[in-house]
Amino acid sequence: MTALPKLNELTVSEKIQMMESLWESLCQQPTDILSPAWHGEILTQRENALSQGVDHFSDWDTAKASLRKSIR
C-alpha cells in the first residue's frame, strides 16, 4: 500500500475522489459491513410509529420544502 498524502495537503476535489474510492471499495463486499444493534432498534421504533399512526412518510419534494422552511 502506498503512503497517503497528508489530508490537509489535498484539494477538495482530491478529498472527494478519495472518499468515492473508499466508498466503492467498501461496497465491493457489503456483507463484511455489519450494522450496529442500535440501527435495528431505531428501525423497529420507526416501524412501530408508522403502524400506530404516530409517524408518516413524506415524498422527497415535500420533505425538502419542509426542511428549507424550518431553517429560514
Image (tube, rainbow, N blue to C red):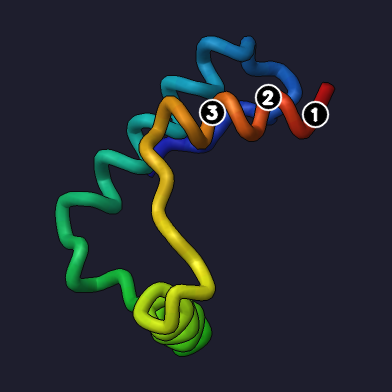
Which element carries disc 1, helix, strand or loop? Answer: loop
Alpha-carbon distance for marks 2 and 1? 5 Å
Q: In x, y percent, where is residue 66?
A: 62, 33
Q: Are marks 2 and 1 in contact (CB under 8 Å)?
A: yes
- Indicate whether 55 appears above or below 66: below
Which residue is nearer to you in this view: 40 or 25? 40
Instruction: Classify residue 48 as left or right of residue 55.
Output: left
Q: Are marks 2 and 3 in contact (CB under 8 Å)?
A: yes
Tag on residue 64?
Answer: 3
Residue type indicated by callout 1 = Ile
Which residue in the rendered view is the most extreme toward the right? 72
Which element carries disc 2, helix, strand or loop? Answer: helix
**Residue behind mark 1:** 71
Residue type indicated by callout 3 = Lys
Instruction: Classify residue 33 as left or right of residue 56.
Output: left
Which residue is nearer to you in this view: 46 or 53? 53
Q: At x 43% / y 83%, what residue is drawn? A: 52
Q: In x, y percent, where is residue 51?
A: 35, 80
For residue 22, say whether it is visible: yes
**Residue behind mark 2:** 68
Q: Quadrant of residue 19?
A: top left
Alpha-carbon distance for marks 2 and 3? 6 Å
Q: At x 52% / y 74%, what residue is drawn? A: 54
